[in-house]
Image (cartoon, rainbow, N blue to C red):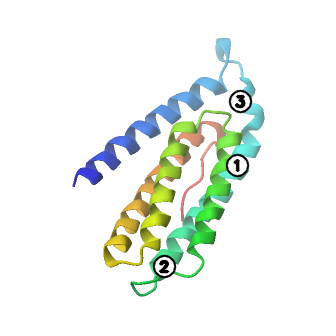
Amino acid sequence: MAREVRTRLVGGAVGIAAAAALCACTTGPAGTTGSAQSSAPNLCASLDALSDQVEQLGAAVASGAPTGEPPAGVSEQVADVEAALRRVEAAGEGSLDSPAAAMQEALTAFGDELASGTEEGRAAAEQSLDEVRQSWESISQAADVRCGTGASPG
């Protein structure tokens, strides 16, 4: 229960902070376009790649494996999501640091908990995967400011 409350509070606050940061850096004085606009294509392409990676990560766990061993390839998929997240973070020029840090924390917990091979670990990993998705939603919503419609997990 405490973890769920923490997740909701952190996820909402991170999303608001990220949206405010992105909004502030895309317009300059008198409404002119700021320098962050020049990286929008890179950010949007990176967001699309991250969306795909997050979707694949969820599919690997949903297809599952018996308790006692993590689903095959999940470690590699976590690494792929982390790499895509780093690209988004770099393209965001610092405006996505908070939601990216929350996503990285949830990814690390997800991998560690799933690797435990226990039923409790798998349940905790599912909660961490939900936190990964919530962090992704925060990043995606914040990016709507720069990418128009943003990206959306499948």
Q: Which marked residue is nearer to the observer: mark 1 or mark 2? A: 2
The residue labelled by disc 3 is 36
Residue at disc 3, secondary structure: helix
Q: Please give the name of the residue rendered at 63% of the width and 70% of the height, measured from the top-left corner.
A: 76
Nearest the eye: 35 or 145? 35
Residue 146 in percent (x, y) is at 64, 37
The residue labelled by disc 1 is 87
Label 1 and label 2: CA atoms lie apart by 26 Å
Q: How many marks?
A: 3
Q: Quadrant of residue 37?
A: top right
The three-letter amino acid code for the residue at tag 1 is Arg
Most extreme residue toward the left, as rendered?
1
Label 3 and label 2: CA atoms lie apart by 40 Å
Q: Which marked residue is nearer to the observer: mark 3 or mark 1? A: 1
Q: Which mark is residue 70?
A: 2
The three-letter amino acid code for the residue at tag 2 is Pro
Q: Please give the name of the residue rendered at 48% of the width and 51% of the height, measured from the top-left corner.
A: 105
